Amino acid sequence: MADTQTALLDDLDRSIINVLQDGFPIGPHPYAQVAGELDTDETTLLERLQRLLDRRILTRFGPMYHAQHMGGAFSLVAMRVPPDDLDRVVEIVNGFDEVAHNYEREHAFNLWFVLATETPDVIGQVLAHIEHATGHRCYNMPKLEEFFVRLRVPV
């Protein structure tokens, strides 16, 4: 999150982001439960979440499923993209539903993303489409072993 966007957040926005990073309850009224934890109401929470999404402060809010447990596959992909073409390529890559997230690195391989597909054989098909659409090669690194690293970004 850029500093300018962080400055646009009030205390409730920050609390929403921080609380939701620790999990989301499962039950008949999960938003009301979270709202109660934040000392607000469900309508306000839902409006705030939508505003954070609309302003692209949050790019995604939703469950994360373990694709491999459902027969799917994950892969880490790197691309070597000329800096002056990076914005165009990022926009194309982000347009694929199978791309979970991507990030820029200060390295010859400067664009990395995670691909999640419904079946393992679709990984190659999606990468071929991305290579065709971007004109740049995708370096596929399928997941061989999983390590759980909990990431939490307090705001």
Image (cartoon, grey):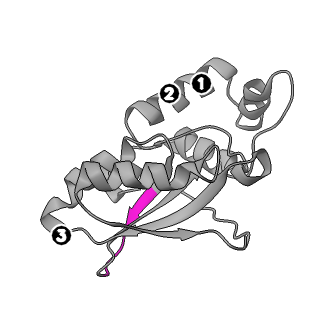
Could you say whether the residue bearing mark 2 is in a helix, strand or loop? Answer: helix
**CA distance separating discs 2 and 3:** 34 Å
Quarter occupied by the N terminus: bottom left
**CA distance separating discs 2 and 1:** 6 Å
Q: Which residue is mark 2?
A: 50
Q: Which residue is mark 1?
A: 46
Q: Are marks 2 and 1 in contact (CB under 8 Å)?
A: yes
Q: Which of the two discs, 2 and 3, labels the residue nearer the N terminus?
A: 2
Q: Which residue is mark 3?
A: 82
Q: Mark 2 vs mark 3: give the one in front.
A: 3
Q: Are marks 2 and 3 in contact (CB under 8 Å)?
A: no
The span picked out in magenta is 102-107
Disc 1 crowd, CA 10 A, few/some/many (<14, 14-19, 20+):
some
Could you say whether the residue bearing mark 3 is in a helix, strand or loop? Answer: loop
Could you say whether the residue bearing mark 1 is in a helix, strand or loop? Answer: helix
**CA distance separating discs 3 and 1:** 40 Å
Q: Amino acid at mark 2?
A: Gln
Q: Quadrant of residue 151?
A: bottom right
Nearest to the observer: residue 85 or residue 127 = 127
Q: Which of the two discs, 3 and 1, labels the residue nearer the N terminus?
A: 1
| Residue 124, image x, y percentages | 49, 56
Disc 2 crowd, CA 10 A, few/some/many (<14, 14-19, 20+):
some
